Image (spheres, rainbow, N blue to C red):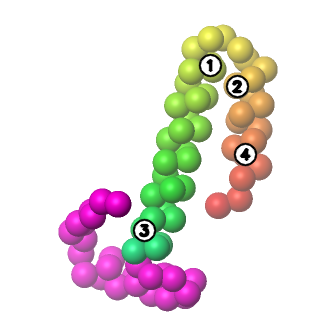
Amino acid sequence: MATLTVRIPDDKHLRLKELAESQGISVNKLIEELSTVALVEFDTHTRFKLISARGDVAEGLSILDKLDSIEL
C-alpha cells in the first residue's frame, strides 16, 4: 500500500471531513472511494475511445446508454 499526501485548503479539508462523517467513514476511506470512481470513469472513457476507434458504432452507443443510466 502507498501513501499519498495532498495539500488542499483548510476549508475543503473540513468539508471532506464532514462528508466522510456523514457517511460514517474516514476521510482516508472517502478519498479511496472517490479515487475508485475516478478510475472507473477513466477506464470507461478509455474503453469507449478504443471501441469508437474501431468504428463499432453500435457498441459505442451501447456504452453511452449504460453511462446515461448511471446515477451519481
- Where, by quadrant of the figure, is residue 32 drawn? bottom left
Q: Picture coordinates of residue 37 (x, y %)?
A: 54, 55
Q: Earlier in the sequence, mark 1 or mark 4?
A: 1
Label 2 environment density (alpha carbons within 10 Å; few <14, some 14–19, many ≥20)? some
Q: In the picture provided, is 15 more to the left or to the right than 20?
A: left
Q: In this view, does 37 lie above or below 6?
A: above
From the viewer's side, name the closer residue of 19 and 5.
5
Q: Nearer the viewer, residue 7 or 68?
A: 7
Q: Which residue is drawn at 49% across and 52% down?
A: 38
Picture quarter with the C terminus: bottom right
The disc at residue 22 is none
Mark in front: 2 vs 3 = 3
Q: Distance between the residues labelled 4 and 3?
A: 24 Å
Q: In this view, does 32 lie above or below 17?
A: above
Q: For residue 22, which quarter of the picture?
A: bottom right
Q: What residue type is labelled 3?
A: Ile
Q: Label 4 sits on what residue type?
A: Asp
The first of marks 3 and 1 along the sequence is 3
Q: Name the residue under label 4.
A: 68
- The residue tagged 2 is 60
Nearer-N-terminus badge (2/4): 2
Q: What element carries label 3?
A: helix
Over which residues does the magenta segment extend?
1-27
Q: Which residue is drawn at 66% across and 11% down?
A: 55
Query: Is the residue under label 3 in contact with that under label 2 (CB below 8 Å)?
Result: no
What is the three-letter code of the residue carrying label 2?
Gly
Secondary element type, mark 1:
helix
Q: Which is more foreground, mark 1 or mark 4?
A: 1
Label pair 2/1, CB-CB below 8 angstroms: yes
